[in-house]
Amino acid sequence: MWIAFALISAVCLGFYDVVKKVALNGNNVFTVLFLNTLFCTLFMSPALVATLTDMGSNFVKPENHLLIFIKAVIVTSSWLLGYFAIKHLPLTIQSSINAFRPVLVLVGAMIIFGEQLNTLQWIGIILGFISLLWVGFIGKREGFSLRHNKWIWAGLLSVGLWAISGLYDKYLMTRFKPINVEAWYSFYQLVIMSFVMACIHKFAKRRSPFQWRWSILMISVFICIADLTYFFALAEPGSLVSIASMVRRGSALVAFFYGIFILHERDVKLKIIDQCILILGVFFLVLGSLS
């Protein structure tokens, strides 16, 4: 069942990247992110109220709130970097960078959870790094140098933080119910972004304009469903964070096809080669994890 949850999460994450691209095109990143955290908190408010009124809840203890706050800091930092990257980079390039996450998660699972890598998994990791270098080659052709472009580095840092968050989720799912984690980390994201918006309002002399779009609301809808289904997957007995993360990265295909067929982005053949390398790498990772 946890594989099914991971697949649903993957599809929702793909549409999440698409609506992000639509919402952020020429728009203010900070305001869009603030509204996303606001909508996510509103969606999860019934769960927040339930934990506040339940005296037997884990969230009576302050130390448990600290654990969720750490999650919120990691995810908010990842989102902020990722939002800037997806605003300024072609969607096909950013989706390929995002697809590198399972490689990082697998390495992290090996280090933190003691998961051992076999030959097939090492082949998958090597293919993942080859794919990343191929993205750098494509980006250079399109004027986005892997070495010098700050938006590519923002995307890579976002991916790294997301991988850390994914590994941290496995630990959180041993302590809390998935819906409660989603509710409270959404709330603390809103607290963080409210502070950020207050600082921007006070200190920033120039701010880029903001335009409301319904795609902003859909960002929150898709990420809430994607996160909840991922948490449910990790909470299932016998679930493996490495495989769940790999399955989840199928989301890159949704964003990739949107960039090719709707946005008509360049270097289609080269990007298809990159996706094939990625898919082959994930195939070896999954095959190695199941063997």
Image (cartoon, rainbow, N blue to C red):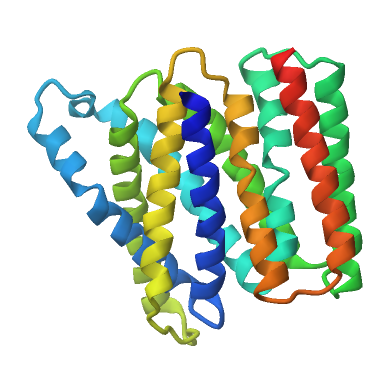
Left or right, residue 121 beside residue 225: right
Q: Eyeballing the image, is 281 above or below 152?
A: above
Left or right, residue 100 beside residue 209: right
For image coordinates 89% across by 68% down, the residue present is 140
For image coordinates 48% across by 78% down, the residue present is 28
**Quarter of the picture holding the C terminus:** top right
Q: Position of residue 83 (x, y in %)?
A: 56, 64
Residue 279 seen from this side: yes
For image coordinates 68% across by 68% down, the residue present is 259
Residue 210 falls in image quadrant? bottom left
Of residues 192 and 142, the one drawn nearer to the viewer in this rendering: 142
Q: Position of residue 115 (x, y in %)?
A: 68, 14
For image coordinates 66% across by 32% down, the residue present is 105
Left or right, residue 19 beside residue 126: left
Left or right, residue 216 beside residue 241: left
Q: Position of residue 197 (x, y in %)?
A: 37, 69
Q: Position of residue 257 (x, y in %)?
A: 68, 62
Q: Eyeballing the image, is 192 above or below 89?
A: above
Residue 70 seen from this side: no
Residue 179 falls in image quadrant? top left
